[in-house]
Image: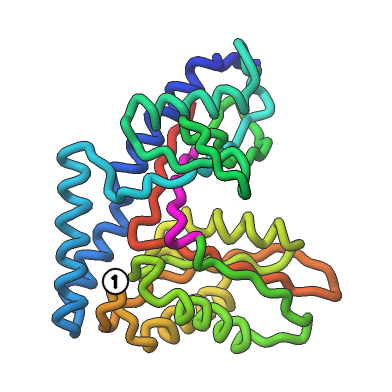
Amino acid sequence: MREVSFETIAETVARLCLRANTVLSPDIGIMLESCWETESSEAGAGALQDMVWNFKYAAAAGVPICQDTGMAVVFAEVGQEVHITGGLFSDAVDEGVRRGYVDGLLRLSVVKDPLRRENTGDNTPAMLNVRLVEGDRIRLTVAPKGFGSENMSAMKMFLPSSTREEIIDFITDTVAAAGSNACPPVILGVGLGGTIERAALIAKMALLRPIDERNPDPFYADMERRALESINKLGIGPQGFGGRHTALAVNIDVSPTHIAGLPCVVNVGCHVTRHASAVI
């Protein structure tokens, strides 16, 4: 049994909050530069140029890539041979978010109640998702989620007889309805199967997958490619200025489901779909 302290967890989460908000994942940065070089729309290319300059400056200066520093979504894989000392794991994560956002001068965007709307003042609580795994380590991923893109997400309960084409149309229609609101070019996490909450979770987790990595199942890899092609034919383009690049990637993950259902959740991520990970 390996001991991991409350303080170690809190400090790690705080560091990840800052890193995720200031340093864009290399795979996304490389893709944005490639899109800039190949964009056919002059206005769209200009928007992509600004995006590239922005994320490079943010990393160099240590400032947020986006003014919406998001709600802190935290994924934790906790080894069964880990014993956490000094307090509750969830409290340690929230303390890390508090330090990362308050001490790091990141925007505080969380309200205590969805209708009364009083700000919590420290961006807590985190949206914490925990999975027990083998071993004596904890893998933490902080994925700040801005709501310009989150608000454009969608879910639908398909019939079990629904086809891949119908699902691709739903994914495409979701992006069409979002227009420029989600700060395209977007990244899409799609969850298929399970129950409603399972589909939503795997859709969110799919946003963490490198955008140049396809589903290992050729059936779904082909579906991802076809959905991306369909979306980019919309012509919405970078920041809605028109062009070839409305989406960077469609990441589909699946789960076993009931014989009578086919849940589908499309979680929309903007061109700065942020996340940072560490193992302790």
SS state under label 1: helix
Q: Position of residue 149 (x, y in %)?
A: 45, 62
Placement of 224 over or under 267, stated as above or below:
below
Q: Judge whether residue 215 can be spotted in this image.
A: no
Q: Position of residue 36 (x, y in %)?
A: 18, 71
Q: Which residues are magenta?
A: 141-150
Residue extending farthest to the front is 116
Q: Residue at x 71, y 57 (%)?
A: 197
For the point 61% across and 48% down, which residue is it? 114
**Closer-to-camera residue (89/115):** 115
- Provide the residue designation for mark 1: 239
Relative side of 142 to 193, left or right: left
Q: In this rendering, would 187 be left or right of 173?
A: left
Q: Is residue 117 above or below residue 154?
A: above
Q: Is residue 144 magenta?
A: yes
* Location of the N terminus (image quadrant): top right
